[in-house]
Image: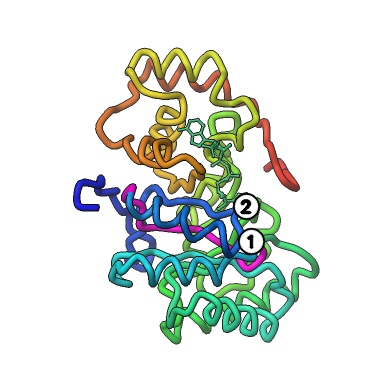
């Protein structure tokens, strides 16, 4: 584990340091997530992204304890799916923490802006309470595009620290990133490799990858690093897990960035894709 790469961290608005690349845990259950996380930690990841709706928090907690890693080395994110008000959010938080077997989270996100916006605003009050009480180090939202985000900001005392949205070279989310930045919100990329839907086979990514002697996945992730977003790629293959962290020792130049910009046609691969 000592030879694993160190992933740079960036500071959220309140000073909380978040690794620039973490590992996404969608699609694993309580059983399958445990050996995967052993490989993930061995590869050098310290930030992991789950959600109550992924139904693997219990397994994630077991894997964290089995790893023997100090808690303060890890950055653990989970999400609330049923953010239908203050009490529902508090209950969901307690349940997630219980399943994970942790006493605090590093990042807690509202998964989707679903339902009534007044209820979402009440849910956000719960997020602010959790932050003030030190039960989470950072709070944020996910899949909040302009309308939903502005509505929340108008009611919030503390703006979200993170907005996790679909982002990859097919959809650079320039407008949403600008809005996030304006409010001091760090944009986090989900589906950063395009979710296995052909992005990594595209000509421009392959050409830039060949030019650097890297893989298309590494180029996609390096491009995200240079945009200043935080990414959470997923792989079931330990070699790819390691490969996806090896993106901090090369740089894409203007020519590379121009070649990749051709891919940015706003294509989303979902689920529930919503354009900006
Ligand atoms: P990704 O964009 O991370 O793509 C994963 C796919 O890429 C898999 O098919 C994987 O295959 C392949 N892959 C990974 N590394 C490589 C590589 N080096 N070379 C070639 N292929 C590679 O998709 P996800 O949907 O998993 O998104 C990542 C995370 O984002 C999720 O796990 C979840 O945590 C989060 N997410 C959040 C959402 C939200 O609403 N907030 C919605 C969706 C996702 P293989 O396993 O064979 O390597």
Instruction: Give residue 211's quadrant in the image.
Output: top left
Say if 200 sits above or below 73 in the image.
above
| Secondary structure of residue under mark 1 | helix
**Up-down: is 241 above or below 9?**
above
Residue toward you, 139 or 69: 69
Q: Which mark is residue 27?
A: 2
Please state the horizontal and vertical placement of residue 190, each as a whole percent of the image: 56, 47
Tell me, yes or no, whether the two marked residues, 2 and 1, touch with CB atoms within 8 Å: yes
Residue bearing mark 1: 54
Q: What segment is highlighted magenta in the picture?
A: 43-53
Q: Is residue 44 left or right of residue 263?
A: left
Counting from the top left corner in percent of width and height, residue 275 is at: 71, 41
Left or right of 239, for residue 264? right
Q: Residue at x 40, y 19 (%)?
A: 209
Residue 204 in percent (x, y) is at 51, 15
Q: Secondary structure at mark 2?
A: loop
Displayed-image quarter of ligand 1? top right
Decide which of 90, 69 is in the foreground and name it. Answer: 69
Q: Is residue 153 visible?
A: no
Q: Is mark 1 within 8 Å of ligand 1?
A: yes
């Amino acid at each position: 584990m000592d030879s694993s790469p160190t992933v740079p961290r960036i500071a959220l608005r309140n000073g909380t340091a978040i690794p620039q690349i973490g590992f996404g845990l969608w699609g694993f259950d309580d059983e399958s997530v445990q050996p995967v996380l052993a490989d993930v930690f061995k590869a050098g990841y310290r930030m992991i992204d789950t959600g109550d709706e992924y139904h693997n928090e219990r397994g994630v907690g077991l894997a964290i304890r089995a790893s023997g890693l100090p808690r303060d080395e890890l950055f653990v994110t989970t999400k609330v799916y049923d953010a239908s008000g203050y009490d529902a959010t508090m209950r969901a938080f307690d349940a997630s923490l219980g399943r994970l077997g942790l006493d605090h989270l590093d990042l807690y996100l509202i998964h989707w802006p679903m339902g009534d916006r007044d209820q979402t605003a009440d849910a956000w009050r719960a997020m602010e309470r959790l932050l003030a009480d030190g039960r989470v180090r950072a709070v944020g939202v996910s899949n909040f595009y302009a309308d939903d985000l502005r509505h929340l900001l108008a009611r919030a005392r503390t703006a979200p620290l993170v907005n996790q949205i679909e982002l990859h070279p097919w959809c650079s989310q320039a407008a949403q990133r600008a809005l996030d930045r304006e409010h001091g919100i760090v944009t986090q990329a989900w589906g950063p490799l395009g979710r296995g839907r052909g992005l990594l086979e595209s000509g421009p990514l392959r050409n830039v990858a060949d030019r650097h002697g890297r893989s298309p996945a590494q180029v996609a992730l390096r491009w995200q690093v240079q945009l200043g977003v935080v990414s959470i790629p997923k792989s079931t293959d330990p070699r790819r897990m390691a490969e996806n962290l090896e993106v901090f020792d090369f740089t894409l130049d203007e020519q590379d960035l121009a070649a990749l910009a051709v891919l940015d046609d706003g294509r989303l691969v979902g689920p529930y894709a919503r354009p900006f």
